[in-house]
Image (cartoon, rainbow, N blue to C red):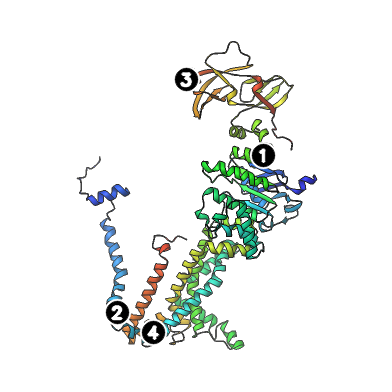
């Protein structure tokens, strides 16, 4: 038997909306609404705290003081270097993973994506064990070339690359997989060799994904903390990046820590805006 | 192999793609437009793909102007980039990030021409195909007909020895199709090398091709001039395309016993053995009663199974021994008060029947 329901009230606006767009009620059931609001609060309130506690009046002083500028400059150039290196070596790897087939390819893909889920500190320890002064590679670098990597800006870049490059690789690999290979076939029939096809057709066609992957990689590198502090340490001006500077400033100069955090927040918002077409419209379209 | 053959394209090969197998043997002479007609999945695109070097043959060989492109027995294979082939793809596949001029200049450029030289080579083709005004447009800003011309210009700019066209007009709307078709015919006539044209549109095949090859299920079902194929279809598929009734049967002098039931009287030319009989839908006379005195040698009863209005005629689907599609005027439908289920008599003159051997191919 069908239970009859008493009519509820439909506002004129809701009537118009349903008439225009179709579909039934859009109101959110309470069991979904309450947890959703808690989630929003949890994500937004801490950022609000950052804005409320910010030393707005002497923001400039807080930023110029101590090692802030040094840390910012170091962070910016290491993240950019990381992105450049990732483009040079990561994009070819993405192509290899997407377009060629060889035994162990799945294993290789798993290894490449491992840093995405690996705690960054573990990455730092691994880098130290490989390239540290007594590491199995670093040992030779030290004794043959007198080259010591740990606790140098180079170590910062290496730590950031280790953590951030996979973001670029998986973004580009996804784009390569979903790209219409018909265009590459067309290029081949027009006389283009494999490398020419890659340069003149494939890369331009996946340019949006390439850009998104690079921004993602850059943002991840900028925020890198665990692997960097483990492998590169925290020498001001040498290896102390923004996140590390924030961490130490919190102990003796909280205002500087907040000011630095604000700068990073601003950068993150800029990154989001640059990715808006891909991410904010729902779903990661590769 | 004659001298003429070695200048053109010769395919004698099998191409395997998963469960599908294409086995063809064909030759296209320079200047000839060979139309490949067939239903979807017949292997037309696979054949083009093999000739272009995008799919290797699994047996046999492909030669172009006397040079081996692909030979499964020796393993010789020329990569797609190394073949002098121009390919116009079904959806054109114009590079979306390049403008029209750069699309057309692509082939000269990647084949080693300098930027300026490639640009002027492209300019020549843009001019020839009337695309100069569109040079700066991106493919997304072109109409279907314009995109088709750009695709042709891009393929021709590589100065190919062979042209491949995969359903070049299928992406166009009916209105522009005829104009573009006429234009394409002109450009194809100017092209010196052999040309393979894939289509499933019979009109396109009849208008554009010098010679037709009907592909069905990966095999060549019929070969001949468009006129020959249209008059003497070799398979049910072709008969349907060109709008003919087709019966197969066994001829014995003046009579053919049809495989599907019934028999037809034909002009006695001493034919014996398996034959095909083609019958034009407009050659059949429909009457409500058995014709008493008639010069027509064939008369048989049938039942109306369906009626379809086609422009100025009505096509009747008639079930009988044999069944037939018959065209009559709307006035006749009214006079005979025809409706599904009506019983009628069909009469056909023996001389209106086209009788030919089952292998409908015409020697080259």
Query: Which residue position holds label 3?
Result: B334
- Please tell me which residue is depicted at 58% across the width and 42% down the height of the picture: B40
- Do discs 1 and 4 share a chain? no
| Residue A141, quarter of the rendered image | bottom right
Compare residues B176 and A207 and report the one nearer the observer. B176
- Residue at the spot 63% in from the left edge and 16% down from the top edge: B296
Q: Nearer the viewer, mark 3 or mark 2?
A: 3
Q: Position of residue A162 (x, y in %)?
A: 50, 75
Whether residue B49 is visible, yes or no, is yes
Q: What residue is at 33 percent from the left and 87 percent from the top?
A: A252
Quick one: label 4 or label 2, which is nearer the N terminus?
2
Q: Position of residue A189 (x, y in %)?
A: 64, 56
Give the residue at mark 4: A68
Read off the residue under disc 2.
A54
Q: Residues within 10 Å of mark 2 (few under 14, many from 20)?
A: many
Q: Would you say the residues marked 3 and 4 are in contact, meaning their CB atoms lie under 8 Å apart?
A: no
Left or right for B258, reference A54: right
Q: Which residue is mark 1?
A: B212
Above or below, A210 against B329 in this view is below
Mark 1–mark 3 distance (CA, rounded to whole Å): 40 Å
Q: Nearer the viewer, mark 2 or mark 1?
A: 1
For disc 2, the chain is A
């Amino acid at each position: 038997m069908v239970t009859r329901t008493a009519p509820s009230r439909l506002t004129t606006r809701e009537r118009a909306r349903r008439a225009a767009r179709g579909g039934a009620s859009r109101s959110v059931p309470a069991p979904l609404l309450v947890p959703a609001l808690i989630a929003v609060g949890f994500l937004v309130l801490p950022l609000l705290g950052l804005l409320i506690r910010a030393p707005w009046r002497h923001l400039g002083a807080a930023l110029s003081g101590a090692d802030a500028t040094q840390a910012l400059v170091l962070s910016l150039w290491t993240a950019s270097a990381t992105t450049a290196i990732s483009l040079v070596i990561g994009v070819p790897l993405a192509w290899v993973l997407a377009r060629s087939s060889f035994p162990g390819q799945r294993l290789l893909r798993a290894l490449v994506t491992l840093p995405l889920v690996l705690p960054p500190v573990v990455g730092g320890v691994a880098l130290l064990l490989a390239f540290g002064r007594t590491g199995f590679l670093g040992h030779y670098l030290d004794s043959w070339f007198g080259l010591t990597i740990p606790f140098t800006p180079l170590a910062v870049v290496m730590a950031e690359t280790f953590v951030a490059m996979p973001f670029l690789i998986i973004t580009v690999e996804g784009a390569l997989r979903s790209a219409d290979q018909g265009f590459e076939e067309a290029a081949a029939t027009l006389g283009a060799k494999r490398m020419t096809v890659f340069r003149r057709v494939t890369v331009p066609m996946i340019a949006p994904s390439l850009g998104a992957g690079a921004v993602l990689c850059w943002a991840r590198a900028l925020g890198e903390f665990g692997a960097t502090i483990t492998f590169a340490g925290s020498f001001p001006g040498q290896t102390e990046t923004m996140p590390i500077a924030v961490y130490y400033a919190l102990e003796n100069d909280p205002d500087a820590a907040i000011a630095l955090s604000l700068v990073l927040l601003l950068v993150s918002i800029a990154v989001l805006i640059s990715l808006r077409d891909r991410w904010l419209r729902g779903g990661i379209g590769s | 192999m004659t001298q003429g053959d070695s200048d053109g394209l010769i395919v004698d090969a099998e191409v395997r793609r998963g469960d599908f197998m294409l086995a063809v043997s064909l030759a296209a002479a320079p200047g000839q437009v060979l139309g490949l007609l067939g239903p979807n999945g017949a292997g037309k695109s696979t054949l083009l793909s093999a000739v272009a070097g995008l799919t290797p043959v699994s047996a046999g060989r492909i030669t172009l102007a006397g040079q081996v492109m692909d030979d499964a027995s020796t393993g010789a294979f020329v990569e797609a980039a190394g073949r002098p082939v121009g390919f116009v793809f079904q959806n054109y596949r114009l590079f979306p990030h390049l403008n029209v001029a750069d699309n057309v200049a692509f082939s000269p450029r990647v084949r080693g021409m300098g930027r300026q030289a490639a640009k002027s080579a492209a300019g020549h083709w843009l001019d020839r195909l009337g695309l100069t005004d569109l040079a700066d447009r991106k493919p997304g800003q072109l109409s279907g007909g314009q995109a088709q011309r750009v695709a042709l210009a891009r393929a021709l700019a590589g100065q190919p020895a062979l042209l491949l066209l995969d359903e070049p007009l299928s992406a166009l709307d009916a209105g522009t199709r005829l104009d573009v078709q006429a234009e394409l015919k002109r450009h194809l006539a100017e092209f010196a090398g052999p040309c393979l044209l894939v289509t499933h549109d019979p009109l396109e095949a009849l208008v554009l091709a010098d010679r037709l090859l009907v592909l069905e299920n990966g095999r060549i079902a019929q070969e001949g001039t468009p006129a020959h194929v249209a008059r003497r279809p070799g398979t049910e598929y072709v008969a349907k395309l060109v709008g003919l009734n087709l019966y197969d049967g066994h001829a014995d002098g003046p009579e053919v016993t049809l495989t599907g039931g019934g028999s037809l009287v034909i002009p006695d030319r001493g034919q014996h053995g398996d034959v095909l009989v083609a019958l034009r839908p407009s050659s059949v006379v429909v009457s409500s009663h058995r014709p008493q005195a008639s010069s027509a040698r064939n008369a048989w009863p049938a039942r109306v199974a369906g009626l379809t209005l086609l422009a100025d005629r009505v096509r009747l689907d008639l079930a009988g021994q044999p069944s037939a599609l018959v065209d009559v005027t709307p006035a006749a439908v009214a006079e005979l008060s025809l409706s599904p289920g009506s019983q009628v008599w069909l009469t056909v003159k023996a001389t209106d029947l086209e009788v030919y051997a089952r292998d409908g191919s015409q020697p080259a």
